Amino acid sequence: MSLLFCHFDKVPNLEPVIPIHILRNDEWELYAAALSPAQFNYAKSRNFAAETGQRLQLPNDAGHIDKILFGAGAQDKDTSGPIAAGHLGGALPIGYYSFERLPNNWNADLAAIGWGMGTYKFDRYLPDNHIAPTLVLSDDQDLKYIKSAVEATNFCRDLINTPASDMGPVALQAAAAKLAQNYGAELRTTIGKDLLSQNFPMIHAVGRAAHEEPRLVEFEWGHPEHPRLALIGKGITFDTGGVNMKSASGARLMKKDMGGAAHALALAHMIMENNLPIRLHCLIAIAENSVSAGAYRPGDILSSRAGLSVEIDNTDAEGRLVLGDALVRAAEDDPVLMIDFATLTGAARVALGPHLPPFFSNRQNPVAGVLAQTSRQNDPVWHMPLWQPYFSMLNSSIADMKNSGGGFAGSVTAALFLERFVKDMPWMHFDVYGWNPSTYAGHPKGADMYAVRGLFSWLKAGGLNGDFSE
């Protein structure tokens, strides 16, 4: 990744720093009156009026770029907020830029994060590395936080964008291990048949048909006296659907089915990089859901770490199986809170689309704080109910439950399934999509991260010190 941010004292002496002026449309008339006649006429000839997303490179008398103008539009229609600066980071030529003027209600750090998120390009398989423009920050901006937010986002995107040929179980384990090593975390792995001897039978069943063995990767970081947080990620490196095989179109993006693991690792990255006072326990349940003679089948009954038996209604509902064993393992160490991330259900996308992940919580008290922080960070989520009557859709006559509830309320029944494995510990579940069908502000088309920045802010604000009794 090229240099995305620096302070003024790091700008090479001969490099100009081009100012960026971001304006509301109702500010344009007064602002334009202060321009030189040539610049005013130039802007007018290009119909610039500070409407949402308008961008203009305003020249000086010598024909060089004097300043960048960008439209934020009307405040009451500004849905992206400062993340809209991502339109600039991904579009301006290589050089040094600084925010000279922002709308009054825009946070400069968030605008910088939006800039960095917008510069992303997945170039691993391209002949030339992408070089992005550099944003020069003021001294009062939090460079460490801004960099960590952008690095975590792009780390998550890189993991998801990488095809399964290069991001199978071994490679995903290596990515988690490298992150743990970078911060001195304690790493543990349970692989292949050891999953059976150490009582992770559902993780083993889902991944036993693949050429790379399934595994559970765990690491712990932070002072043992700090509040304990468990992050759990679904790491299905490719999902064929198993014996209940996906269609060609359904399988096309299934390299992203380890997106929950990528989200959990990205949040772990931010926590460790910013040295939050947290005892972190990160668990990544990794498997490839493949088809071979050893694949698990519809109608099979699996045992689980919780002691519950699960009848397999559909082998394409595999993510909740690997998460179930991992959740039980996380609960055994009595964390203050468990948070899991998973690219779990198409039903969540039908309900809320690709950009707004639903989240479920078995405690009501922290919900308002999470919603407030995710909204403040322009990283929105939507609270969904753990509607207990729907658990009847998972009833089985020959096991404790089924792994799939049919066509109704799919994201809710998936969450209700997971809830049976948390032992009534405080828990949140985020059903993320991990993919952008098309580019929008700060979010290029392709792999993407949601909810992590907002959750980090909630944790940084003391979220683990709240009341989890109800």
Image (cartoon, rainbow, N blue to C red):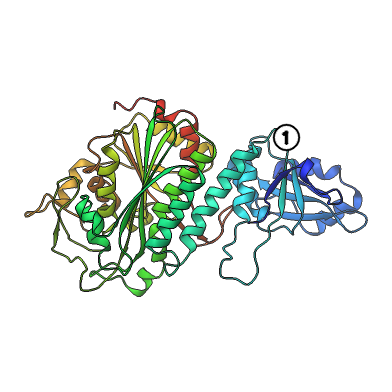
Residue 46 position (above or below residue 333): below
Q: Secondary structure at mark 1?
A: loop
| Outermost residue toward the right in this view | 61
Q: Which residue is mark 1?
A: 139
Taking the spot 41% from the left edge, 65% from the top edge, the residue there is: 255
79 vs 123, nearest the viewer:
123
432 vs 46, nearest the viewer:
432
Q: Quadrant of residue 172?
A: bottom left
- Left or right, 76 with respect to 296, comes to right
150 vs 54, nearest the viewer:
150
**Is any atom of residue 367 visible in this view?**
yes
Number of other residues with Cα within 10 Å of mark 1, as a class: few under 14, some 14 to 19, many 20 or more: few
Give the number of callouts. 1
Taking the spot 74% from the left edge, 59% from the top edge, the residue there is: 93
Residue 264 horizontal/vertical position (percent): 42, 47
- Left or right, 39 with respect to 356, comes to right
Residue 300 position (above or below residue 31): below
Residue 289 horizontal/vertical position (percent): 30, 65
Residue 289 position (above or below residue 146): below
Taking the spot 27% from the left edge, 41% from the top edge, the residue there is: 386
| Outermost residue toward the left in this view | 397
In which quadrant will I find the C terminus?
A: top left
Residue 182 horizontal/vertical position (percent): 51, 46
**Is any atom of residue 408 visible in this view?**
no
- Amino acid under disc 1: Asp
Residue 373 horizontal/vertical position (percent): 49, 35
In which quadrant will I find the N terminus?
A: bottom right
